[in-house]
Amino acid sequence: MSDNEDIPGGNGIFIGKKSRGVRIFGGISYGNSRSGVHIEEGADVQIVGMTTANNGLDGITIAKEGVAPLSEILDKINENIDDLKLQIHLKDELIAEINTIKAQLSSPKPKNTIVQESLKTVKSILEGVAASGIYDSIKYGISAYITTS
């Protein structure tokens, strides 16, 4: 296979924007000069139990153009936040975590670790109100963005 200038080198796994139905269950991406996994805009990907270590950048990188689906999930939560009937401190925490994620996604160098930890908190809060039905409609979307390392 010859080099393709459109595909950034040094990534353990590169998932292009036209990829559909990609599922990675387990595996290790170790010692790459760039990301362990790089996902481009528009790719349909689910990653479960992937380990990344000693890569030049954070283990899994979602291209800036590729954050729209996550932004849409966060917007949906914001639109329905009053329907969740959360205690005020949980509502405040949920809003703060969503704002943290959005700030990272708009950063020129988003920090994947911060996004991951905030997503875990959002998921945990929403699991506590799963009976509302809102969580059911977004749980797979959130889970797709939470990775293990």
Image: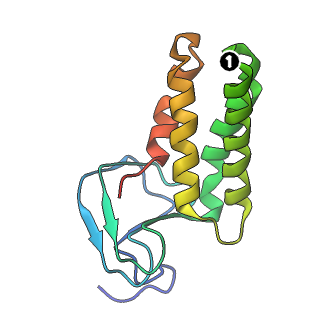
> Dot 1 corresponds to which residue?
86
Residue 92 is situated, as x and y percent measured from the top left of the image, at 74, 32
Residue 24 relative to residue 10: left or right: left
Q: Quadrant of the N terminus?
A: bottom left
Report the residue at 25% width, 65% height from top: 28
State the residue in front, 144 or 41.
Answer: 144
Residue 81 visible in the snapshot: yes
Position above or below: 82 against 33: above
Query: Which element is circle 1 on?
Result: loop
Residue 28 relative to residue 46: left or right: left
State the count of labels. 1
Q: Quadrant of the C terminus?
A: bottom left
Residue at the limit of the structure toward the front, as seen here = 89
Residue 108 is situated, as x and y percent measured from the top left of the image, at 70, 71
Position above or below: 33 against 53: below
Report the residue at 46% width, 33% height from top: 140
Residue 146 is situated, as x and y percent measured from the top left of the image, at 46, 47
- Examine the image and state in which quarter residue 137 appears: top right
